[in-house]
């Protein structure tokens, strides 16, 4: 299996990676709503716990809503997204540890952890747009961390970006099955 074949297999199995992003964006949206009502601690707890559901939920949506078979067992790059998730979890744990002393840093650090984890998705799926997604989320996290321009609305911005990219990737994933494979943007 070539790298291009492996990437096409992942795009097919996970509808371009879009459903997972929409699910993640909805969890960020829920965290934004909880933060507005109950504060950073409960909101981050919700985000952290629901974050563990993103992959299983994306698998279920891909299988049952989009009727996608799993990625091939011989796919040599199927683990890349999972492996980058381990580093992301490390960043989220650091954010969690800072919650009692620097609550204003928690969501910016989470955005940086999530954003940087998406850079590996470029290799997994073959879509350069994952670099754009990673750069946007990481930049938002750094901007909020160092200058606080969003006034506590960072989770809402992350949600909007992830949902928008999720729909874009899903539509691309659906369209790519109806035409021959070519270089992916």
Image (tube, helix red, strand yellow):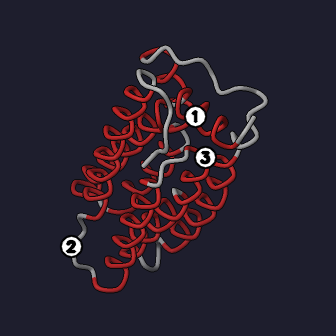
Q: Is mark 3 on a helix, strand or loop?
A: helix
Foreground mark, 2 or 1, reads 1
Left or right of residue 13, residue 101 in this image: left
Which label belongs to residue 8?
A: 1
Which label belongs to residue 124?
A: 3
Foreground mark, 1 or 3, reads 1
Nearer-N-terminus badge (1/3) = 1
User: Quick check: 77 above or below 45?
Assistant: above
Q: Are marks 3 and 2 in contact (CB under 8 Å)?
A: no
Label 3: how many residues lie within 10 Å, few (<14), some (14-19) or many (20+)? many
Q: Quadrant of the N terminus?
A: top right
Which label belongs to residue 151?
A: 2
Mark 2 and mark 1: span between their CA atoms?
Answer: 40 Å
Where is residue 146 drawn, in percent x and y? 35, 85
Q: What element carries label 2?
A: loop
Label 1: how many residues lie within 10 Å, few (<14), some (14-19) or many (20+)? many
């Amino acid at each position: 299996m070539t790298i291009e074949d492996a990437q096409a297999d992942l795009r097919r199995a996970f509808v371009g990676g879009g459903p997972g992003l929409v699910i993640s964006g909805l969890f960020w949206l829920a965290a934004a709503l909880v933060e507005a009502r109950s504060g950073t601690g409960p909101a981050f707890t919700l985000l952290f716990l629901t974050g563990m559901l993103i992959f299983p939920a994306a698998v279920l949506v891909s299988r049952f809503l989009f009727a996608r078979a799993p990625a091939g067992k011989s796919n040599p790059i199927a683990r890349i997204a999972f492996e980058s998730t381990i580093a992301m979890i490390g960043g989220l744990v650091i954010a969690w540890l800072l919650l009692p002393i620097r609550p204003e840093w928690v969501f910016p650090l989470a955005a940086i952890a999530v954003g940087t984890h998406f850079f590996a998705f470029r290799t997994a799926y073959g879509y350069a747009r994952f670099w754009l997604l990673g750069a946007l989320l990481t930049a938002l996290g750094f901007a909020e961390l160092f200058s606080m321009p969003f006034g506590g609305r960072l989770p809402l911005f992350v949600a909007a970006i992830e949902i928008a990219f999720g729909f874009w990737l899903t539509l691309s994933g659906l369209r790519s099955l109806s035409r021959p494979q070519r270089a992916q943007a």
